[in-house]
Image (cartoon, grey):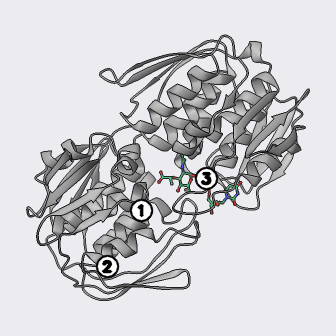
């Protein structure tokens, strides 16, 4: 089983280059199903999840060529066959459900294994299905599969009970080929939603309002859609993770190819703790030589503090002066990393939906397990400051979302290696 071995090696120093966004490239790859013309997507990250999405696209008949050297993927869906997304693929990656909207719009039918829950929560897709029904689809659930069928898709006004990122993306993609106008209210506002809307408009979609809570989609016919060459945005969560890595090791990192506007809440919170942040043309410099103090965090949908940065920030807060309170409001079970951090000597207590993090807790190296993508990242950050070696297993979680993580960390002074015992 592959593992990471990490040893404390002092402050991280130097430059790190951020890769393309996992949570932008996945819906954009799925969206290429809508058109029969060739789509070329550039600045793609080298991730397991991108490989799984490639397999899914090939299973619906798409021609897919990926070139990780050029960081480019070419996808052509001139014909789309019936898809029954198998459970084995869907359970590897929840984002498999993002092919539902485009497939339903292109073929009028999609059958996909219900994505089960995962470590961070039940992760239902009721809002996705409610959106498809509003556009005219019939939904059937049986034997762990969900099937959506529609002879005709007609635009409608859809209110999301929660600003779900995936539901906003799936409904937006389906609405591109639905007749008339669709309005999504209480829509998610994440930068990845804007990137997807920009991609859809680049192939001939007519979308306005992405990045606000109300998105309007004018339906077009499939023959109006074209191909495109599209560059995705950098990964704001990878950006935030390296910012926290600089802070937790009291280092000095220049983070290149980063969009500061996408990580405003992380910048604000780090500054509140006493970390110095300077931004200049696409780079963010993080310097943490001063005393870092406690702060409180409440995760919220964008533009609030991102849930995907909660675990990494918790690791930082175990080492600062004072006690911090973290409230996770987006997922119901996103504290799996607490048990592992406490085994490394942290003192974190769960009280309802809050976590109380005592500061100035010296961490000790231990054998720990990654339970999900961001929990794994938090354990890597803990290993950078723990006394003695830390061994992290189940690192496949981490490699789903961090491209060349070991190489990037080593380049700025981390003592980390991947072993396969
Ligand atoms: C996306 O997941 C991201 N994944 C997640 O990133 C991220 O944590 C999440 O958005 C929130 O920002 C991708 O973009 C591939 P949601 P998604 O639908 O779309 C509830 C990472 O670490 N909900 O916004 O699945 C749901 O249970 C991953 O990169 C419903 O109740 O998130 C959750 O509590 C982890 N019904 C909340 O909404 C639904 O139909 C947010 O979920 C859909 C969601």
Cα separation between marks 3 and 1? 17 Å
Q: Nearer the viewer, mark 3 or mark 1?
A: 1
Q: Is residue 219 above or below residue 398?
A: above
Does the beta carbon at disc 1 come under 8 Å from ligand 1? Answer: no
The answer to whether residue 67 shows anywhere in this view is yes
Which residue matches tag 3?
A: 189
Q: Is residue 388 left or right of residue 224?
A: left
Q: Is residue 31 left or right of residue 55?
A: right
Residue 309 numbered tag: 1
Of the two numbered discs 2 and 3 on the same chain, state the one appearing first in sequence. Answer: 3
Q: Are marks 1 and 2 in contact (CB under 8 Å)?
A: no
Q: Is residue 19 above or below residue 4?
A: above
| Earlier-in-chain disc, 1 versus 2 | 1
Residue 194 location (% of width, % of height): 58, 42
Q: Quadrant of residue 12?
A: bottom left
Q: Judging from the image, what secondary structure is the residue with disc 1 in?
A: helix
Give the CA separation, mark 1 to mark 2: 19 Å
90 vs 222, nearest the viewer? 90
Closer to the N terminus: mark 3 or mark 1? Answer: 3
Q: Secondary structure at mark 3?
A: loop
């Amino acid at each position: 089983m592959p593992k990471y071995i990490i040893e404390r090696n002092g402050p991280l120093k130097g430059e790190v280059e951020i890769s393309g966004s996992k949570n932008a490239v996945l819906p954009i790859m799925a969206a290429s199903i809508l058109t029969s013309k060739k789509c070329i997507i550039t600045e793609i990250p080298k991730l397991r999840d991108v490989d799984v999405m490639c397999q899914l696209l090939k299973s619906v008949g798409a021609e897919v060529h990926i070139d990780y050297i050029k960081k480019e993927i070419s996808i052509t869906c001139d014909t789309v066959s019936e898809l029954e997304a198998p459970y084995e693929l869907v359970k590897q990656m929840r984002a498999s459900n993002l092919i539902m909207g485009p497939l339903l719009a292109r073929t009028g039918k999609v059958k996909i294994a219900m994505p089960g829950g995962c470590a961070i929560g039940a992760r239902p897709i009721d809002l996705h299905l409610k959106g498809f029904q509003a556009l005219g689809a019939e939904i059937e659930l049986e034997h762990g599969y969900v099937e959506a069928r529609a002879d005709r898709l007609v635009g409608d006004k859809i209110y999301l009970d929660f600003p779900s990122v995936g539901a906003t993306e799936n409904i937006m993609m389906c609405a591109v080929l639905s007749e008339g106008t669709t309005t999504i209210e209480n829509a998610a506002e994440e930068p990845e939603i804007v990137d997807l809307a920009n991609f859809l408009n680049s192939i001939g979609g007519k979308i306005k309002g992405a990045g606000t809570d109300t998105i309007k989609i004018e339906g077009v016919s499939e023959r109006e859609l074209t191909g495109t060459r599209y560059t995705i945005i950098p990964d704001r969560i990878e950006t935030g993770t390296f910012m926290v890595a600089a802070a937790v090791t009291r280092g000095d990192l220049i983070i290149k190819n980063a969009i500061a506007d996408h990580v405003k809440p992380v910048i604000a919170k780090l500054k509140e703790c006493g970390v110095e942040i300077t931004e200049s043309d696409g780079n963010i410099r993080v310097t943490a030589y001063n005393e870092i103090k406690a702060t409180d965090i409440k995760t919220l949908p964008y533009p609030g503090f991102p849930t995907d940065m909660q675990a990494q920030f918790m690791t930082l807060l175990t080492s600062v002066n004072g006690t911090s309170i973290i409230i996770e409001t987006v997922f119901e079970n996103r504290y799996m990393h607490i048990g592992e951090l406490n085994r490394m000597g942290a003192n974190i207590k769960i009280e309802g939906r809050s976590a109380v993090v005592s500061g100035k807790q010296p961490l000790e190296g231990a054998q720990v397990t990654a339970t999900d993508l961001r929990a794994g990242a938090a354990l890597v950050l803990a290993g950078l400051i723990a006394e003695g070696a830390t061994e992290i297993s189940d690192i496949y979680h981490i490699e789903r979302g961090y491209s060349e993580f070991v190489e990037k960390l080593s380049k700025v002074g981390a003592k980390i290696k991947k072993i396969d015992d």
